[in-house]
Amino acid sequence: MTLKNQVCGGIKWASISMIATRAARLLSTFVLARLLAPEAFGLVAITNVTVELIRMLSELGFGTAYVQRHYSNPEDERRAANTIFWIGAFCNVSLYVAATAATPLIVSYFKVPQAGPLLRVLLLSILLDIVSTVPSFELLKRMQFKSLSLCEVSQVCVYTVVAVCMAFANAGAWSIIVGDLTSKVVVSVLLFRAVKWRPRFIFDGIFARELFNFGKFIWAFALLSGFGDAMDKLFVGRFYSAADLGVYSMAFVLIMFPVANISGIVNRVTFPLFSKLNHDSENLRDAFRKALAHVAILAFPASIGILAVGPLLVSVLLSPKWLPTIPLINILTFYGLALAISSITGPVFQAIGKPNALFYTSILHHSTKLALLFGLQRHELAGICYAVLIPMITSSLIAFILVTKYLNLSPINLFMSMLRPAFAAGLMFVAVRILMPILEEAGSVPESIELVVAVAVGVTVYVAASAATNHKTYREFLQSAGAMLRGREVA
């Protein structure tokens, strides 16, 4: 199979997985938001942020290094995979024991004792990672996105069924915790069965050192990013109530829905692709420009669209108890947009062997964020949102400047790749905001119909504006998307 066919197949299955998993996850969130109180989501946010931080300590950057490296023979590749497995097993068991023992201290930090039992149960997912980590990297390295996507779809389906059923049974925050853990068990089994690789008692110190030398900056970046990304939730969980943390987390869920879809596909498909092109500067530049243009075509309407219909979205899909999320969404939308656009830079740095650029940029990003969190605390949750937004915009600009330097790209060309989609999205926003008061004045129109009409008008305006102002790139995007979704090679 040619590289282009692999990429096309990757996009196809990554898109199927994205649509199915994000739709199911979002639907379950809307259902759970109506059944559970904001306090329950706050408790879950405390447990999730803790477990994710612990999980990041165990990866050590070996997985990314394993995907990026080319091995001269299958035996070397097997030795590297087994080395990663045993290091991961040791780290995960150690972290599980330490975190379980430290649970009282963690709970006392958040001043929410009822989170303790939830955390102890969710920590079991750290042990399940031992089974699933290497198989997931095996599938990614071989660009077997179909198998990976089917596993992910199964995981989110199990989560949705378990969590929603338990919520209807008034299980509260346990609905989400048990749903998460059950789905993790299922996906671990499926991933392990999806690959031919099985762990053996093989450990090679030379491979471990080589992988760590490459992956240490990626691990340090991921670790710093993990703690930095969680900093706002740790801050809100410490200085605000569990209900406030639930509201803040729900705002993030809504703005991150399109971002997760876009950046998930970008990182999953472009990193293996860019890694294969890392010795071909011209094709790598072309691939990056094309990927950026296509990401912009998706990111701007998705993010600006949420900004345009945010009040209706919350009112129709959630309930009045979530109305405090609206002002937060208005700020965080721009965070999501910057994150989606800049997601294309990370795979480039990793593919060209410059993971240190990610690390140093992240230091600046998160040190700025920490200072702003303390400086803007008096402005309540809106201040927290601005403390998250400002560093994201700054670090995104720096990342693009570095990419233009490393790839010898014209900044003007990159700017133009984003300007036209931004203009079309701006027209869409104006059209929707003009339409919404007209629909409200009608009086008899249900809010759900208002939302459907507003979305339909927004999509129509954006497509028309894109076809008129960015017709060449937009046509290329539609052709590429159509071909890739059908699993065909792009010309």
Image: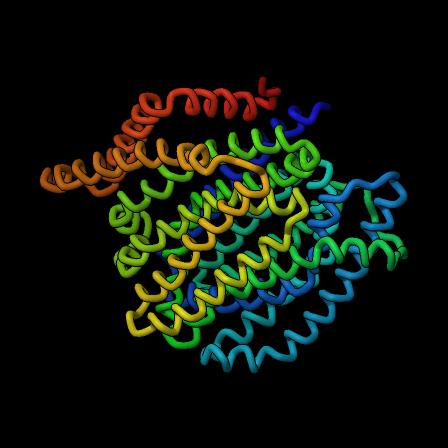
In the rendered image, the vertical position of residue 285 relative to residue 163, given as above or below? above
Camera-side residue: 39 or 144? 144
Q: Is residue 120 left or right of residue 343?
A: right
The residue positioned 71% from the left and 65% from the top of the image is 92
Q: Quadrant of the C terminus?
A: top right
58 shown above or below 423: below
Q: Is residue 337 left or right of residue 305?
A: right
The x, y position of residue 130, in whole percent, is 73, 58
User: Where is residue 385, by image quadrant?
Assistant: bottom left
Q: Is residue 144 visible?
A: no
Query: What colour scheme was applied to this rendering of the protein?
Result: rainbow
Quadrant location of residue 32? bottom left
Residue drawn at point x = 80 percent, y = 54 percent:
210
**282, above or below 244, in the image:** above
- Residue farthest toward the top in the current orientation of the protein: 491
Give 140 or 371, whichever is nearer the viewer: 371
Judging depth in this view, the residue of 178 and 100 nearest the camera is 100
Specify whether 126 is left or right of 78: left
Residue 232 spot, x, y in % from top left: 44, 66
Q: How many marks?
A: 0
Q: Does residue 260 appear in the picture of this structure?
A: yes
> Which of the 4 quarters of the picture holds residue 445?
top left
Residue 402 horizontal/vertical position (percent): 54, 47
Picture coordinates of residue 292, whole percent (x, y): 49, 35
- Residue 354 as seen in the image, left or right of residue 86: left
- Image point 61% across, 46% down: which residue? 349
Residue at horizontal 56 percent and vertical 25 percent from the top: 484
Quadrant of the rendering where the N terminus is positioned:
top right
